[in-house]
């Protein structure tokens, strides 16, 4: 319901922008422009707090600015970037198209607007089109070479292909603005990929202090403790890391409120599926089912989820339910040979 309201709000803004109706601003001293700038600055403050709970409010302020002045390039770019960060990797094709139009329009109005190129890059990054994102960032950095946000997006776009270089660029962003919280979150991601788990946890602790409401920090820390457990030889420490991981992953779910904050859904699903896998491995099947059901509540159309349901029900001796879920998993991921093999085995 919350997502539907938000999407309707965005569509309304786009209708205004596409209507060709000029929103005042006949001169640099136009009162509408001054009001628009006030909303823009408020939006920027909310956005730079790096708190997912505030991105929706930032979007509203950008929209208010554009309702007053529909040819405000910085607000167009800001709205596109806020939409990208708000939806993250859950960005749909429709949402991508809307935000992309906003960023394109900002650049038509000002071809040297670094924020426009950065918004484009962040959209591509959240579609995992990292090479396209990096090309956009070349322009953004060209026009604003000392902007920490530019280096944040560039470093984030490098995370998958070159975590070492990503860390170097993110540290550059940190030097430019040590108060930009999201830098620490992705520095943790780079450290985790490089196997520097203590460094990753240190950065997440810093991020958690700055943005205490983001359940993504708890989930990420839980995943890192599981990584530490896998590399630890001492049995007592392994058990301690597992306990800390379970506590953080359960806290992720406990602190969430997906009914009101739909953007938390990916973290809830990840935490729940991770716990379900762990309980499956421990042969604690009722606990595994409990967490699979929590994941299903937020992401029912997930092939891996139904595959795990199938494995649990198979272990419990319920072949009918196992087959039902494995068939659903096959429908969602028809090219997955592992799922097909498991289904054939029934």
Image (cartoon, rainbow, N blue to C red):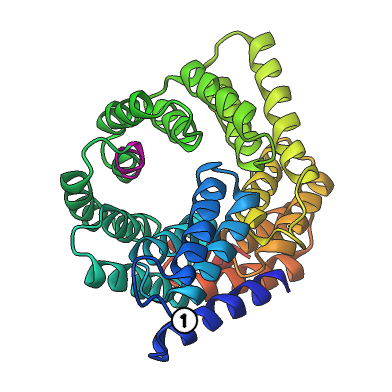
Quadrant in the picture for the C terminus: bottom right
At x 18%, y 53%, the residue is 135
Residue 168 horizontal/vertical position (percent): 28, 26
Tell me if 167 is positioned left or right of 328 in this view.
left
Q: Which residue is mark 1?
A: 14
Q: Residue at x 73, y 35 (%)?
A: 282
Where residue 151 sits, quadrant-wise, is: top left
Dot 1: element:
helix
Q: Position of residue 242 (x, y in %)?
A: 68, 24
**Mark 1 neighbour class, 10 Å CA radius: few under 14, some 14 to 19, many 20 or more:** some
Q: Residue furthest front?
A: 29
- In the displayed structure, does residue 313 sit left or right of residue 69? right
Q: Residue at x 51, y 76 (%)?
A: 67
Asked whether the viewer can see residue 307, the reply is yes
Q: Is residue 290 left or right of residue 175?
A: right
Task: Look at the image and give the residue range highlighted in magenta.
Answer: 148-153
Residue 85 percent across, percent down from the top left: 48, 54
160 relative to 99, above or below:
above
Q: On the image, which quarter does residue 144 sit in?
A: top left
- In terms of depth relative to the viewer, which is nearer, 181 or 126? 181
Question: Is any atom of residue 303 visible in this view?
Answer: no
Quarter of the image where the N terminus is located: bottom right
Place of residue 344 in the rendered image (x, y in percent of width and height, measured from the top left): 55, 67
Residue displayed at 37% across by 62% down = 77
Magenta segment includes 21: no
Q: Nearer the viewer, residue 58 or 53?
A: 58
Residue 147 higher or lower than 321, as above or below = above
Magenta segment includes 149: yes
Q: Nearer the viewer, residue 342 or 259?
A: 259
């Amino acid at each position: 319901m919350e997502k539907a309201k938000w999407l309707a709000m965005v569509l309304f803004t786009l209708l205004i922008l596409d209507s060709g109706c000029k929103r005042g601003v006949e001169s640099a001293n136009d009162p509408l422009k001054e009001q628009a700038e006030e909303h823009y600055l408020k939006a920027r403050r909310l956005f730079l707090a790096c708190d997912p709970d505030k991105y929706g409010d930032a979007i509203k302020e950008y929209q208010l600015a554009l309702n007053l002045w529909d040819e405000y390039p910085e607000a167009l770019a800001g709205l596109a970037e806020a939409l990208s960060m708000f939806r993250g990797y859950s960005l749909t094709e429709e949402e991508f198209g809307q935000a992309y139009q906003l960023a394109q329009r900002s650049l038509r109005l000002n071809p040297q607007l670094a924020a426009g190129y950065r918004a484009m890059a962040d959209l591509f990054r959240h579609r995992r089109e990292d090479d396209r994102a990096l090309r956009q960032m070349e322009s953004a950095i060209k026009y604003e070479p000392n902007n920490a946000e530019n280096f944040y997006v560039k470093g984030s776009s490098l995370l998958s292909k070159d975590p070492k270089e990503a860390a170097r660029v993110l540290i550059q962003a940190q030097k430019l603005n040590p108060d930009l919280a999201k830098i620490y979150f992705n520095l943790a991601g780079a450290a985790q990929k490089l196997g520097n788990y203590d460094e990753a946890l240190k950065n997440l602790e810093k991020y958690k202090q700055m943005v205490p409401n983001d359940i993504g920090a708890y989930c990420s820390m839980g995943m890192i403790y599981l990584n530490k457990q896998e590399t630890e030889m001492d049995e007592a420490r392994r058990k301690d890391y597992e306990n800390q991981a379970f506590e953080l992953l359960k806290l992720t779910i406990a602190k969430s409120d997906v009914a009101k904050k739909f953007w938390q859904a990916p973290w809830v699903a990840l935490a729940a599926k991770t716990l379900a896998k762990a309980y499956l491995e421990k042969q604690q099947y009722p606990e595994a089912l409990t967490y699979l059901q929590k994941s299903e509540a937020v992401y029912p159309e997930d092939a891996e989820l139904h595959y795990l349901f199938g494995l649990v029900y198979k272990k419990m001796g319920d072949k009918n339910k196992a087959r039902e879920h494995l068939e659903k998993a096959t429908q969602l991921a028809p090219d997955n040979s592992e799922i097909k093999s498991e289904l054939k085995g029934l």
